[in-house]
Amino acid sequence: VQLQASGGGWVQPGGSLRLSCAASGSIFSIGTMTWYRQAPGKQRELVAVIVGGGGTNYVDSVKGRFTISRDNAKNTVYLQMNSLKPEDTAVYYCNARVQIRSAVSWSDYWGQGTEVTVSS
């Protein structure tokens, strides 16, 4: 199973970016999908999570600005980021909990990270 993240880049404060993370390979089912970020010199933090049924949760600092969504037919999770701030600058990583066959245990997989820079 591979996760391919994309969509990062440079944007001015107040701008928007949309991150994507597509899972591929031997996939029977995908459960929770999560976006994390790691800013320079800081620990990785959870940004947004979406469970298989569509329920979502966000870290307080992005509530009202970021929206996580998923397309189960495409095995893809998205992160729409609006009203970006310099403090959103980080490498963003996606994570997915995947079941590769029926009745086997779930495993976590990580994307390679996509860099987001917010500056003027």
Image (cartoon, rainbow, N blue to C red):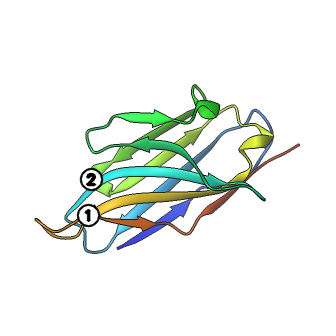
Q: Is residue 68 left or right of residue 85?
A: left
Is residue 9 in view from this perspective?
no
**Residue type indicated by callout 1:** Trp
Residue located 49% across and 58% down the image: 94
Establish if 39 lies above or below 53.
Answer: below
The crowding category of the residue bearing disc 2, from other C-alpha atoms within 10 Å (few below 14, some 14 to 19, many at least 20), is few
Comparing 4 with 41, the one in front is 41
Q: Is residue 4 left or right of residue 8?
A: left
Establish if 12 lies above or below 101.
Answer: above
Q: CA distance from mark 2 to mark 1?
A: 19 Å
User: Could you say where residue 102 lies in the image, as x and y percent from the top left?
Assistant: 11, 66
Q: Nearer the viewer, mark 2 or mark 1?
A: 1
The residue that disc 1 covers is 106
Q: Is residue 99 left or right of residue 67?
A: left
- Numbered circle sitting on residue 78: none
Q: Quadrant of residue 101?
A: bottom left
User: Could you say where residue 67 lies in the image, as x and y percent from the top left?
Assistant: 51, 35
Residue located 75% across and 32% down the image: 14
**Residue type indicated by callout 2:** Ala
User: Could you say where residue 36 lies in the image, as x and y percent from the top left?
Assistant: 55, 52
User: Could you say where residue 7 lies in the image, as x and y percent from the top left?
Assistant: 59, 55
Q: Quadrant of residue 109?
A: bottom left
The residue that disc 2 covers is 73
The crowding category of the residue bearing disc 1, from other C-alpha atoms within 10 Å (few below 14, some 14 to 19, many at least 20), is some
| Label 1 secondary element | loop
Residue furthest to the top in view is: 64
Comparing 50 with 67, the one in front is 50
| Label 2 secondary element | helix
Establish if 84 lies above or below 90.
Answer: above
Is residue 15 in view from this perspective?
yes
Q: How many marks?
A: 2
Q: Which quarter of the rendering shows the C terminus?
A: top right
